[in-house]
Image: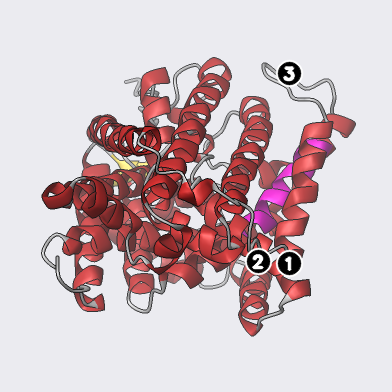
Amino acid sequence: MDTKQQKLNLKREVGLMGAVSLLAGTMMGAGIFMSPQTVISAIGSCGGSLVVWASCALQIIMVSLCFAELGTVIPESGGEYIYVLRTSGPVVAFILAFSSIMFLRPFNNAACALGFGQYAVALFHSDCHPSALEVKCAAAAAIIVLTYVNCLSVRASMSLQVVFLVGKVVALMLIIMGGLVMLFRGHTGSFEDAFENTNVDISSISVALYQGLWAYTDWNALNNVTEELKSPEVNLPRALVIAISLVTATYLLVNVSYLAVMTPKEMMTSSAVAVTWGNKVLGSWGWIMSVAAALSAFGSLNGTFFSGGRVCFVAAREGHMPDILSMAHVHRLTPSPALIFTTLISLVVLIPGDFQSIVNFFSFTAWIFYGITLSGLIYLKIKKPDLPRPYSVPIILPILVLIVATFLVLAPIIDKPQIEYLYVTLFILSGAVVYVPFIHYKLCPGLLSKLTVFLQLFLEVAPVEKNQ
C-alpha cells in the first residue's frame, strides 16, 4: 500500500491590504504617543525635533527599500536573520538570532506593552500618576491576550490588526485636525524662533534619533513573514512604500499638532503628551486620547508578536534554536511554540523594565545588526550580480544607510560613553560562546530530544516545510 506523507506549510494568507495593515499598524503604536516627548527633550527645540522626525523618516525609507530587495532575492521568512545567514554564515546569524530572541524582541515587546499599560491605566487615574505595578500588570495582560490570539489563527491576528489600524488612524486624524484648527486660530508661538536652544552635540542628536527611530520600529515586519505573504516579489515593495509614506506623513503632522497646542517646555515635562493634548483641546473629553493611545499601542504590540515570533521560528528551523521552536500547530498552522517562548521572555523583561533605557539600548543593538545585514546586500550586489532581482535599488543606497547606521552605533559611545553599552556589547558577543558547545558540537542532544517529543505532543505541533 502506497502512503504519502503530508507536508505542513505556513499558509500564504497575507495580501497587500493585510501587509499594509500589518506594517503601518505595527509602526504606528506606542512610539508616536511616547517618543515626541523624549525627542524634543534630547534635541531641545521645536524645529530641531521636526528635523529629527523627518531625518528618521528618510532613514527608514532608505533602509526599508534595501530590505525590500533582500526580501525578493532571499524570499524566506526571518528578516535580517535569514539574510545574514545566507550572506555572512551561521556564526554571525546565530549571534543575531540569539540577541534578537533573548534581547531585542522581548525588549521591544516590553516597551510597547508598557506604552499600552501607561495609557490604559491613566483612564482610572485622572488626578495622579498610576503606580508602576498597575502599569506592568496591564502590560502583562496585553502580552498574554495577544499571544493567545496569535496562537489561535493568522487570520484572526490580521483581522485584529486591520481593526486597530483603522481605530488608531482615526485617533491620529483627530489629533492632526485639532492641531490644524489651533494653528488657524493663531497658536503658532512654538514655531517662533523654532531652532532656539537646539542641542547640536553628537550625544543629543544620537539619543534623539534613537527615540525617533524607535517610533518606526518593525518597519521590517514584512521581511519576517515573507513566506506568509502573497506574491512577495510584488506586494513586499508596494506595501513598504504605501505603509511608510502613510506613517511618515502622519508622524510629522501629529508632531506639528502637539507643538501647536503645547509649548516645547510643556511637552518635555508632560508624562503623557497625548493626554496633555487631549485635556487642552477636548476638555472633559480628554479621556478619549488615553483610549486611543492604549488601543494604538495594543495594535502595535499585536503586529510585533506576529512578526517577531517568526524570527524565533525560522532560527529554530535553521538549527540555531531548539527544534520545538520550529514547529507549527497541526490544525491552526501557527508557530505557537515560538510565540509562547517569546512571550515568556517578554514577561520576564517586563519586571525591571524602564521605558527610556529600553528604547536606547534596543536602538543601539538593532542598528548594529541592520548594518551587518546591509553589508550583506552590498556583498550580493558586488559578488553575485546575476541573482534574480524582481526589485533592486542602486548600490549607493545601502552604502549611505550603512554610514548612518555606523554613526548611530558609534556616536553615543564616542561622545558620552556609558558602561551599559559595554554590557550590551558583551551580551551580543556571548552568542558566540553559546554557539560553539550547543550548536556546533551539539551538546546534550538526548535531553533536548526527550523534551521536544513531550512538548510536541502537549502543544500538538509538527515540523514545517519551507514555502517556495
- Report the residue at 78% width, 33% height from top: 397
Q: Is residue 60 above or below residue 244?
A: below
Q: Which residues are magenta?
A: 365-378
Residue that numbered label 1 is attached to: 201
Residues at marks 1 and 2 touching, judged by CB atoms closer than 8 Å:
yes
Residue that numbered label 2 is attached to: 204
Q: Amino acid at mark 3?
A: Pro
For the image, the number of numbered tags is: 3
- Asked if residue 453 lies left or right of residue 203, the reply is left
Disc 2 from disc 3: Cα separation: 42 Å
Q: Position of residue 316 (x, y in %)?
A: 49, 52
Q: Secondary structure at mark 3?
A: loop
Q: Secondary structure at mark 2?
A: helix
Residue 75 within the magenta-colored segment of the rendering: no
Looking at the image, is mark 3 or mark 1 earlier in the sequence?
A: 1
Residue that numbered label 3 is attached to: 388
